[in-house]
Amino acid sequence: MLTVLITGSSTGIGRRTAETLAAARHTVYATMRDPAGRDADDVSELEALARSRNWQLRVVELDVTSQESADAAVRQVLEETDGLDVVLHNAGHLSIGYVEAFTEDDVSHLLDVNAVGAHRVNRAALPHMRARRSGTLLYVGSTIQVTTPPFLGPYVASKAAFDALAVVTSYEVSQFGIETSIVMPGAITQGTNHFPGASRAGDEQVTAQYAELDPLVERTHDAHEQLFAPGTTADPQSVADEIERILALPVGRKPFRSVVDAAQAGVDHVMAFSDLTREVFVRRLGFAETLEVKR
Protein backbone atom coordinates (compact mmCIF):
# COMPACT_ATOMS: atom_id res chain seq x y z
CA MET A 1 0.00 0.00 0.00
CA LEU A 2 1.12 3.53 -0.78
CA THR A 3 1.30 6.78 1.13
CA VAL A 4 -0.19 9.49 -1.09
CA LEU A 5 -0.27 13.27 -0.73
CA ILE A 6 -3.01 14.94 -2.79
CA THR A 7 -3.24 18.68 -3.36
CA GLY A 8 -6.62 20.37 -3.79
CA SER A 9 -8.78 17.71 -2.12
CA SER A 10 -11.83 19.68 -0.98
CA THR A 11 -13.99 18.99 -4.04
CA GLY A 12 -14.00 17.50 -7.52
CA ILE A 13 -11.19 15.29 -8.78
CA GLY A 14 -9.07 15.69 -5.66
CA ARG A 15 -11.90 14.75 -3.32
CA ARG A 16 -12.99 11.74 -5.39
CA THR A 17 -9.41 10.55 -5.74
CA ALA A 18 -8.78 10.82 -2.02
CA GLU A 19 -11.87 8.71 -1.33
CA THR A 20 -11.04 6.19 -4.07
CA LEU A 21 -7.45 5.65 -2.96
CA ALA A 22 -8.41 5.46 0.70
CA ALA A 23 -11.05 2.84 -0.16
CA ALA A 24 -8.28 0.89 -1.91
CA ARG A 25 -6.47 0.84 1.48
CA HIS A 26 -3.79 3.37 0.65
CA THR A 27 -2.77 5.93 3.28
CA VAL A 28 -4.03 9.27 1.99
CA TYR A 29 -3.14 12.79 3.05
CA ALA A 30 -5.87 14.93 1.51
CA THR A 31 -4.70 18.53 1.55
CA MET A 32 -6.77 21.70 1.47
CA ARG A 33 -5.85 25.36 1.53
CA ASP A 34 -7.99 26.39 4.52
CA PRO A 35 -9.25 23.35 6.48
CA ALA A 36 -10.11 25.43 9.55
CA GLY A 37 -12.02 28.05 7.56
CA ARG A 38 -13.61 27.96 4.12
CA ASP A 39 -12.94 24.21 3.73
CA ALA A 40 -14.23 23.26 7.20
CA ASP A 41 -17.46 21.64 5.95
CA ASP A 42 -15.55 19.58 3.38
CA VAL A 43 -13.12 18.49 6.09
CA SER A 44 -15.94 17.38 8.39
CA GLU A 45 -17.60 15.36 5.63
CA LEU A 46 -14.40 13.67 4.53
CA GLU A 47 -13.19 12.87 8.03
CA ALA A 48 -16.59 11.46 9.02
CA LEU A 49 -16.58 9.25 5.94
CA ALA A 50 -13.05 8.07 6.72
CA ARG A 51 -14.01 7.16 10.29
CA SER A 52 -17.13 5.29 9.21
CA ARG A 53 -15.15 3.20 6.71
CA ASN A 54 -11.96 2.83 8.71
CA TRP A 55 -9.87 4.55 6.05
CA GLN A 56 -6.32 5.71 6.62
CA LEU A 57 -7.09 9.26 5.54
CA ARG A 58 -6.06 12.54 7.11
CA VAL A 59 -6.78 16.11 6.08
CA VAL A 60 -3.73 18.41 6.12
CA GLU A 61 -3.41 22.11 5.39
CA LEU A 62 -1.46 22.93 2.23
CA ASP A 63 -1.56 26.19 0.32
CA VAL A 64 0.35 25.63 -2.92
CA THR A 65 1.13 29.35 -3.17
CA SER A 66 3.37 29.05 -0.10
CA GLN A 67 6.65 27.12 0.01
CA GLU A 68 6.48 27.15 3.80
CA SER A 69 3.05 25.53 3.69
CA ALA A 70 4.20 22.87 1.20
CA ASP A 71 7.26 22.11 3.33
CA ALA A 72 5.13 21.78 6.48
CA ALA A 73 2.63 19.42 4.83
CA VAL A 74 5.34 17.12 3.49
CA ARG A 75 7.16 17.23 6.83
CA GLN A 76 3.99 16.11 8.62
CA VAL A 77 3.58 13.16 6.25
CA LEU A 78 7.18 12.08 6.80
CA GLU A 79 6.86 12.38 10.58
CA GLU A 80 3.75 10.20 10.66
CA THR A 81 4.59 7.51 8.09
CA ASP A 82 7.39 5.35 6.78
CA GLY A 83 7.77 7.60 3.74
CA LEU A 84 5.97 9.42 0.95
CA ASP A 85 5.36 7.29 -2.13
CA VAL A 86 3.15 9.49 -4.33
CA VAL A 87 2.63 13.21 -4.80
CA LEU A 88 -0.57 13.85 -6.70
CA HIS A 89 -0.71 17.38 -8.11
CA ASN A 90 -4.35 18.35 -8.47
CA ALA A 91 -4.78 21.85 -6.98
CA GLY A 92 -5.91 24.42 -9.51
CA HIS A 93 -8.22 27.32 -10.25
CA LEU A 94 -10.26 28.38 -13.28
CA SER A 95 -10.64 31.94 -14.60
CA ILE A 96 -13.04 33.05 -17.31
CA GLY A 97 -12.93 36.26 -19.33
CA TYR A 98 -11.28 38.27 -22.09
CA VAL A 99 -7.50 37.92 -22.20
CA GLU A 100 -6.91 41.67 -22.47
CA ALA A 101 -9.02 42.25 -19.36
CA PHE A 102 -6.88 40.03 -17.14
CA THR A 103 -4.45 42.22 -15.23
CA GLU A 104 -0.82 41.33 -14.75
CA ASP A 105 -1.69 40.27 -11.19
CA ASP A 106 -4.58 38.11 -12.43
CA VAL A 107 -2.34 36.18 -14.80
CA SER A 108 0.54 35.93 -12.37
CA HIS A 109 -1.75 34.59 -9.65
CA LEU A 110 -3.22 31.92 -11.92
CA LEU A 111 0.23 30.80 -13.04
CA ASP A 112 1.30 30.79 -9.39
CA VAL A 113 -1.54 28.50 -8.33
CA ASN A 114 -1.75 26.22 -11.35
CA ALA A 115 1.91 25.81 -12.31
CA VAL A 116 4.33 27.18 -9.73
CA GLY A 117 2.27 25.57 -6.96
CA ALA A 118 3.16 22.10 -8.19
CA HIS A 119 6.81 23.11 -8.38
CA ARG A 120 6.72 24.21 -4.73
CA VAL A 121 5.27 20.88 -3.64
CA ASN A 122 7.90 19.05 -5.68
CA ARG A 123 10.64 21.05 -3.99
CA ALA A 124 9.23 19.95 -0.64
CA ALA A 125 8.86 16.27 -1.54
CA LEU A 126 11.70 15.49 -3.95
CA PRO A 127 14.59 15.55 -1.44
CA HIS A 128 12.90 12.65 0.36
CA MET A 129 12.06 10.77 -2.85
CA ARG A 130 15.55 11.25 -4.27
CA ALA A 131 17.09 9.92 -1.06
CA ARG A 132 14.88 6.83 -1.28
CA ARG A 133 15.40 6.61 -5.05
CA SER A 134 11.73 5.84 -5.55
CA GLY A 135 8.34 7.47 -5.81
CA THR A 136 5.74 8.74 -8.25
CA LEU A 137 4.82 12.26 -9.30
CA LEU A 138 1.32 12.18 -10.75
CA TYR A 139 0.02 15.36 -12.35
CA VAL A 140 -3.65 16.08 -13.07
CA GLY A 141 -3.30 18.20 -16.17
CA SER A 142 -5.89 19.05 -18.81
CA THR A 143 -6.75 18.48 -22.45
CA ILE A 144 -7.29 22.24 -22.64
CA GLN A 145 -3.72 22.93 -23.71
CA VAL A 146 -4.62 21.20 -26.98
CA THR A 147 -8.29 22.13 -27.40
CA THR A 148 -7.68 25.78 -26.37
CA PRO A 149 -11.28 27.04 -26.15
CA PRO A 150 -12.15 30.76 -26.14
CA PHE A 151 -12.42 32.95 -23.03
CA LEU A 152 -10.12 30.83 -20.85
CA GLY A 153 -6.79 32.31 -21.95
CA PRO A 154 -4.76 32.56 -18.73
CA TYR A 155 -6.08 29.20 -17.55
CA VAL A 156 -4.96 27.56 -20.80
CA ALA A 157 -1.54 29.17 -20.42
CA SER A 158 -1.21 28.01 -16.82
CA LYS A 159 -2.11 24.40 -17.63
CA ALA A 160 0.37 24.40 -20.52
CA ALA A 161 3.06 25.65 -18.15
CA PHE A 162 2.06 22.99 -15.60
CA ASP A 163 2.45 20.27 -18.23
CA ALA A 164 5.79 21.58 -19.48
CA LEU A 165 7.23 21.70 -15.95
CA ALA A 166 6.02 18.14 -15.36
CA VAL A 167 7.70 16.89 -18.54
CA VAL A 168 11.07 18.57 -17.98
CA THR A 169 11.10 17.59 -14.30
CA SER A 170 10.47 13.99 -15.33
CA TYR A 171 13.80 13.80 -17.19
CA GLU A 172 15.75 14.71 -14.09
CA VAL A 173 13.89 12.76 -11.41
CA SER A 174 13.79 9.61 -13.54
CA GLN A 175 17.50 9.19 -12.84
CA PHE A 176 16.67 8.87 -9.14
CA GLY A 177 14.08 6.13 -9.65
CA ILE A 178 11.10 8.51 -9.59
CA GLU A 179 8.28 7.90 -12.07
CA THR A 180 6.06 10.53 -13.69
CA SER A 181 2.50 10.18 -14.99
CA ILE A 182 0.37 12.98 -16.40
CA VAL A 183 -3.39 12.38 -16.44
CA MET A 184 -5.21 14.77 -18.77
CA PRO A 185 -8.93 15.09 -18.04
CA GLY A 186 -11.24 16.67 -20.55
CA ALA A 187 -13.84 19.18 -19.39
CA ILE A 188 -15.35 18.16 -16.05
CA THR A 189 -18.71 19.89 -15.72
CA GLN A 190 -20.31 17.87 -12.92
CA GLY A 191 -19.33 17.09 -9.34
CA THR A 192 -16.82 19.90 -9.12
CA ASN A 193 -16.66 23.60 -8.25
CA HIS A 194 -14.48 24.36 -11.27
CA PHE A 195 -16.93 26.41 -13.35
CA PRO A 196 -19.18 27.71 -10.52
CA GLY A 197 -16.13 28.87 -8.56
CA ALA A 198 -14.27 30.41 -11.49
CA SER A 199 -12.91 33.93 -11.07
CA ARG A 200 -13.27 36.73 -13.62
CA ALA A 201 -10.84 39.13 -15.27
CA GLY A 202 -9.94 41.98 -12.97
CA ASP A 203 -10.05 44.95 -15.35
CA GLU A 204 -13.74 45.83 -15.52
CA GLN A 205 -13.20 48.76 -17.87
CA VAL A 206 -11.61 46.56 -20.52
CA THR A 207 -14.20 43.86 -19.91
CA ALA A 208 -16.95 46.43 -20.62
CA GLN A 209 -15.40 47.19 -24.00
CA TYR A 210 -15.94 43.55 -24.99
CA ALA A 211 -19.60 43.66 -23.91
CA GLU A 212 -20.89 42.52 -27.30
CA LEU A 213 -19.22 39.17 -26.64
CA ASP A 214 -20.72 38.73 -23.18
CA PRO A 215 -23.44 36.31 -24.37
CA LEU A 216 -20.70 33.99 -25.63
CA VAL A 217 -18.78 34.13 -22.36
CA GLU A 218 -21.88 33.52 -20.28
CA ARG A 219 -22.55 30.21 -22.02
CA THR A 220 -19.03 28.86 -21.50
CA HIS A 221 -20.23 26.20 -19.06
CA ASP A 222 -23.19 25.18 -21.23
CA ALA A 223 -20.93 25.07 -24.28
CA HIS A 224 -18.76 22.47 -22.57
CA GLU A 225 -21.82 20.54 -21.34
CA GLN A 226 -23.10 20.05 -24.88
CA LEU A 227 -19.86 18.35 -25.93
CA PHE A 228 -20.97 15.06 -24.43
CA ALA A 229 -23.05 12.43 -26.19
CA PRO A 230 -26.51 11.76 -24.70
CA GLY A 231 -26.18 9.61 -21.61
CA THR A 232 -22.51 10.49 -21.18
CA THR A 233 -21.36 12.42 -18.14
CA ALA A 234 -18.04 14.09 -17.40
CA ASP A 235 -17.64 13.04 -13.80
CA PRO A 236 -14.54 13.37 -11.58
CA GLN A 237 -14.86 9.70 -10.64
CA SER A 238 -13.61 8.62 -14.07
CA VAL A 239 -10.37 10.49 -13.41
CA ALA A 240 -10.08 9.08 -9.89
CA ASP A 241 -10.51 5.56 -11.25
CA GLU A 242 -7.77 6.11 -13.82
CA ILE A 243 -5.41 7.43 -11.15
CA GLU A 244 -6.11 4.36 -9.00
CA ARG A 245 -5.38 2.12 -11.99
CA ILE A 246 -2.09 3.85 -12.77
CA LEU A 247 -0.83 3.74 -9.18
CA ALA A 248 -1.56 0.00 -9.01
CA LEU A 249 0.83 -0.68 -11.90
CA PRO A 250 4.38 -1.87 -11.12
CA VAL A 251 7.44 0.35 -11.37
CA GLY A 252 8.33 0.98 -14.98
CA ARG A 253 4.84 0.13 -16.27
CA LYS A 254 2.99 3.32 -15.48
CA PRO A 255 1.99 5.34 -18.56
CA PHE A 256 3.73 8.66 -18.96
CA ARG A 257 0.46 10.18 -20.14
CA SER A 258 -3.20 9.19 -20.00
CA VAL A 259 -6.17 11.09 -21.42
CA VAL A 260 -9.59 10.79 -19.76
CA ASP A 261 -11.99 12.73 -21.97
CA ALA A 262 -15.72 12.13 -22.19
CA ALA A 263 -15.87 14.74 -24.97
CA GLN A 264 -13.66 12.57 -27.17
CA ALA A 265 -11.82 15.55 -28.63
CA GLY A 266 -8.97 13.46 -30.04
CA VAL A 267 -6.38 14.84 -27.62
CA ASP A 268 -5.04 11.34 -26.96
CA HIS A 269 -3.92 11.09 -30.60
CA VAL A 270 -2.36 14.55 -30.56
CA MET A 271 -0.41 13.89 -27.38
CA ALA A 272 0.77 10.47 -28.54
CA PHE A 273 2.36 12.09 -31.59
CA SER A 274 3.63 15.05 -29.57
CA ASP A 275 5.30 12.84 -26.97
CA LEU A 276 6.79 10.61 -29.66
CA THR A 277 8.27 13.66 -31.41
CA ARG A 278 9.64 14.96 -28.11
CA GLU A 279 11.20 11.61 -27.20
CA VAL A 280 12.86 11.28 -30.60
CA PHE A 281 14.36 14.75 -30.19
CA VAL A 282 15.62 13.99 -26.68
CA ARG A 283 17.28 10.84 -28.00
CA ARG A 284 18.90 12.83 -30.83
CA LEU A 285 20.31 15.16 -28.18
CA GLY A 286 21.97 12.16 -26.56
CA PHE A 287 19.82 12.18 -23.42
CA ALA A 288 17.97 8.90 -24.01
CA GLU A 289 18.56 7.73 -20.43
CA THR A 290 16.35 10.53 -19.09
CA LEU A 291 13.34 8.91 -20.77
CA GLU A 292 13.59 5.77 -18.64
CA VAL A 293 13.21 5.36 -14.89
CA LYS A 294 16.55 4.29 -13.50
CA ARG A 295 16.06 1.21 -11.34
Image (spheres, helix red, strand yellow):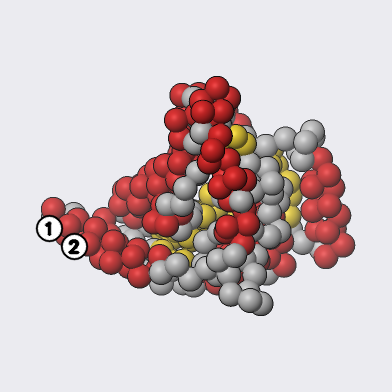
Nearer-the-camera pick, 244 or 183: 183
Is residue 86 among the parts visible in the rendering?
Answer: no
Callout 1 amino acid: Arg
2 and 1 marks in contact (CB < 8 Å): yes
State the mark number for residue 116.
none
Element at label 1: helix
Q: Quadrant of the N terminus?
A: bottom right
Q: Nearer the viewer, residue 186 or 247?
A: 186
Would you say residue 235 is visible in this rendering? yes
Residue situated in front as seen by the camera: 292 or 237: 237
Q: Residues within 10 Å of mark 2 (few under 14, many from 20)?
A: few
* 166 displayed left or right of 217: left
Report which residue position mark 1 lands on.
284
Residue 196 pos. (x, y %): 69, 46
* Residue bearing mark 2: 280
Q: Residue lying at the far front in this picture: please name it.
A: 212
Numbered disc 2: secondary structure:
helix
**Is 292 situated left or right of 286 in this image?**
right
